[in-house]
Amino acid sequence: MEKITRKQREKKRRKFDIIEAALNSFAKKGFHGATMAEISNECQLPLATIYGLFKSKEKIYFELLKIKAKELTKLIEKAVEDKSISPIERLKKGMDEHFYFCLENKNFTKIYLEERQRLWGLFQEDLKCEIKILLDRLFNLFSGVFEEGIDGGQFKPYPAINLSELYVSVITSAASSWLINKENELKFRKRLDTGFEIFTSGLLKNL
């Protein structure tokens, strides 16, 4: 593997610092309320340096979204591809990983849930496509588990991709309530567990 140069390492570190500063600014004032000047102040880097790496705060947000989407997908992938446990246990494990991700990335989760619809229209088509690939990967990971459960006769034969989309919606809904209502971690966990129980009670065969 080719080693990166000192200049490349410095550029990478500065991009990371800018993204972290932007995340803090977005969390405090919302995406639309934050400014590039505030991000500059937050990370203690000149505006010229920031604009040299990111042309706009939309570009910073997009880079943040890509990073976090990759992190979450990697966690879910590890959870649901554990063939040592049953499909229903892997679904639960995938939900648990999503739960811990939300807790550890509370500011990002809040920004994403608040801005996902409004900001989607700002992305260029190629950027949308890149994000869509990551989102599709997440849905397909859960879909594969549902398909395995259906093929093994454990789950009712609903369309696997629809089940996946609904399942992710259960998790997203619980996260939204947690943030909107300013609930504690325990209430978030109970809401997820209730959603899992209701969802799987209609999914499993021979109940």
Image: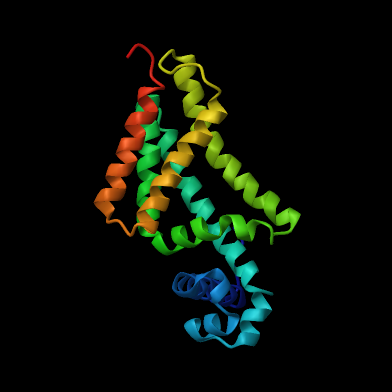
**In which quadrant will I find the N terminus?**
bottom right
Q: With 168 as the anchor, is 136 left or right in this view?
A: right
Quick one: which residue is furthest to the right in this view? 125
Answer yes or no: is residue 200 visible: yes
In the figure, 174 relative to 119: above or below? above
Nearer to the camera, 54 or 78? 54
In the figure, 120 relative to 136: above or below? below
Nearer to the camera, 64 or 109? 109
Image coordinates for residue 74, horizontal then vertical, percent = 48, 46
The residue at 35%/53% (across/down) is 178
Quarter of the image holding residue 107? bottom left
Image coordinates for residue 154, horizontal then vertical, percent = 40, 16
Q: With 203 as the anchor, is 113 left or right in this view?
A: right
Quick one: which residue is furthest to the left in this view? 186
In the figure, 94 relative to 201: above or below? below
Image coordinates for residue 51, horizontal then vertical, percent = 66, 80
In the figure, 20 relative to 137: above or below? below
Quarter of the image holding residue 123? bottom right
The residue at 56%/23% (across/down) is 159
Image coordinates for residue 149, horizontal then vertical, percent = 44, 20
The residue at 57%/56% (across/down) is 116
**In which quadrant will I find the C terminus?**
top left
Quarter of the image holding residue 15? bottom right
The residue at 35%/50% (across/down) is 100
Q: With 6 as the anchor, is 43 left or right in this view?
A: left
